[in-house]
Image: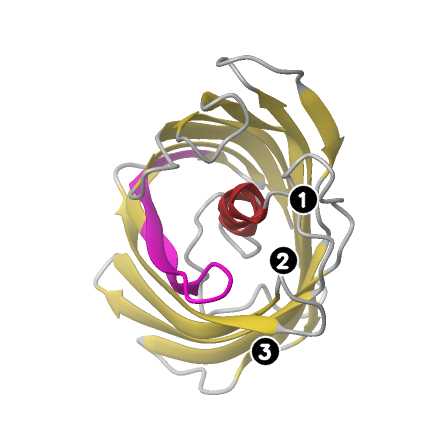
Amino acid sequence: MKPPRIVGVLAALGLLLPAAAGAEWPYLTEEASTVGLGHFSLSAGVSRTEQDSPFLPGGRGVFWTLPEFQGTLGVGPHAEVSFDYALLYFDPSGGGATVYQSGDLRLWTKLDVLPAKGHDLSIRFGVKLPNAPDDHGLGTDNTDFFAALLLDVHLGSALLSLNAGLGILGSTETNQAQDDVFTWGAALRGPIGASFSAGFDASGYAGPWGIRIKHEYAWLGPVLTWRNGGFRIDLAGRRGIVDALGWGWVLGASYER
């Protein structure tokens, strides 16, 4: 019998940790703008998060993505497709065996429906494939669907991005059932010199974890970026706002053209 609360907690982690598919990985809040026809970006990185919760194996531990990948390709002047994927590692410091396994592959499509000077309005939809098994609580073995409305507002040299959407998650407790969650995000970023930029990112969801269980959680934290031509290095700090989530960081490199 699988532990549904453990699956629910770590499935929530898997939803957000590697899910920053977009023009500016590792932000979790998606930009409304697209990369443009024929342009692309590829990112690879690693993340580490400390966990402390009675619902985790052993009560506490360290959760890694080793590594995580993200790619985006412009398929039209205002359309792009993207993916994200990670290998998952959990080390339960409270006792128990470590787990290293595949995460879920996520596929996304974004359409900029109102490109204009000073702002963009887009729709984005995607699917999470059930690549991560639920044997150890690191996956749900369910297919999930997502749709969101994205807004960019340019404030001088800074960019404000806002997201609001819906996730339709396969239930981990009941066959042929689903859990619907509200997803959201907000990020503000801007340059701090010729080669550096910085921002603050917040993203999360609210909704049920199984029958009659409702919960909310969010990640928030700063992002620092160094850029040289098409090459980019990013460092993000994250703080989880829920019992099961703690401090974490993401480090990675990207190439875009």
Q: Position of residue 224 (x, y in %)?
A: 35, 34
Give the label on residue 34, or none: none
Say if mark 2 contacts mark 1, CB within 8 Å: yes
Labels 2, 1: front one: 1
Residue behind mark 2:
172
Q: Is residue 23 magenta?
A: no
Asked whether the viewer can see residue 73, the reply is no
Highlighted range, magenta: 202-226
Q: Residue at x 51, y 86 (%)?
A: 113
* Mark drawn on residue 78: 3
Q: Residue at x 36, y 55 (%)?
A: 203
* Residue at 38% over, 69% down: 163
What secondary structure characterizes most of the magenta part?
strand
Callout 3, which amino acid? His
Sooner in the amino-acid sequence: mark 2 or mark 3: 3
In what element is the residue under mark 1?
Answer: loop
76 relative position to 164: left or right: right
Amino acid type, callout 2: Thr
* Quadrant holding the N terminus: top right
Splitting the image into 4 quarters, where does residue 73 fall?
bottom right
Which residue is labeled 1 in the image?
Answer: 2
